[in-house]
Amino acid sequence: MPIRIFIDQGHNPQGVNAGAEGNGLREQDITYNVGVILAQMLNSDPRFEARLSRNSPNDSLGTSNATSLQARVSMANSWPANYFISIHCNANPNPAINGSEVYVYQAGTQSYWLAQHILNGVVDQAGTRDNGVRVNPSLYVLRRTSMPAVLVELGYLTNSSDALKLRDDQRGFARGIYYGLLSYFGFSRPA
């Protein structure tokens, strides 16, 4: 039985629940692409089966922020997925702020250990700064999923160095998450 990974590409293409912007990039475009690449990597590995929240760049979920988040969670819960990974990009009014971080509902959990492996993978493969695993019980997708869940903030669109990586190395970010999963499960990387 392959391990079922639900990949939520954060945010909608426009309108309701659209994402952050910075340096000419839109969060929802980056998260969509990184999710697709990650799903391809996982689905070509017989140990995994992956599904996406957005199967085309124009897929829009829900009619409000709340229903958009509910739709993502219910897709994962009804499959049911074994693990939930939500992909996001960050933004900050201070353009110097940069790096990757991973959010979880609670410390000392399977989600927390998974988050640590994924963060290590992303930092290693994409070359971003390690901002650590952070606990945030208020995030809906972490609170309402019925499986271990992590929310990955790949980097800051508002930081010029991160923005270049997010634009030019989406495969590196996806590979970082994939390698993080392999490391978490103690699996070898494919040749």
Image (cartoon, helix red, strand yellow):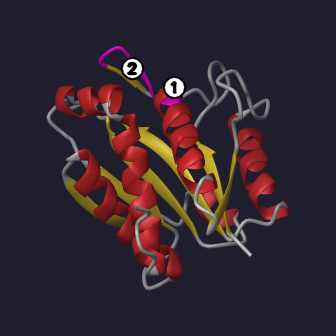
Q: Residue 63, position in %: x, y? A: 79, 29
The residue wearing badge 2 is: 25
Reply above or below: 77 against 75: below
Q: Secondary structure at mark 1?
A: helix
Q: Amino acid at mark 2?
A: Leu
Gap between marks 2 and 1 measured at Cα: 8 Å
Residue numbers of the magenta segment? 23-28
Q: Residues within 10 Å of mark 1 (few under 14, many from 20)?
A: some
Residue 76: quarter of image: bottom right
Q: Is residue 157 left or right of residue 111?
A: left
Q: Residue 71, position in %: x, y? A: 78, 46
Q: Amino acid at mark 1?
A: Asp
The residue wearing badge 1 is: 29
Front residue (pair 33, 91): 33
Residue 119: quarter of image: bottom left
Judge whether residue 27 is colored magenta.
yes
Q: Is residue 136 left or right of residue 167?
A: right
- Quadrant including the C terminus: bottom left
Residue 148: quarter of image: bottom right
Q: Residues within 10 Å of mark 2 (few under 14, many from 20)?
A: some
Reply above or below: 23 against 133: above
Residue at (46%, 76%) from the top-left corner?
187
Front residue (pair 10, 122): 122
Residue at (29%, 64%) from the top-left corner?
120
Q: Residue 160, position in %: x, y? A: 19, 26
Residue situated furthest bottom in the rendering:
108
Do labels 2 and 1 touch, CB within 8 Å?
A: yes
Judge whether residue 189 is colored magenta.
no
Asked whether residue 135 appears in the rendered view, the answer is no
Q: Residue 102, position in %: x, y? A: 39, 59
- Quadrant including the N terminus: bottom right
Residue at (51%, 81%) from the top-left corner?
110
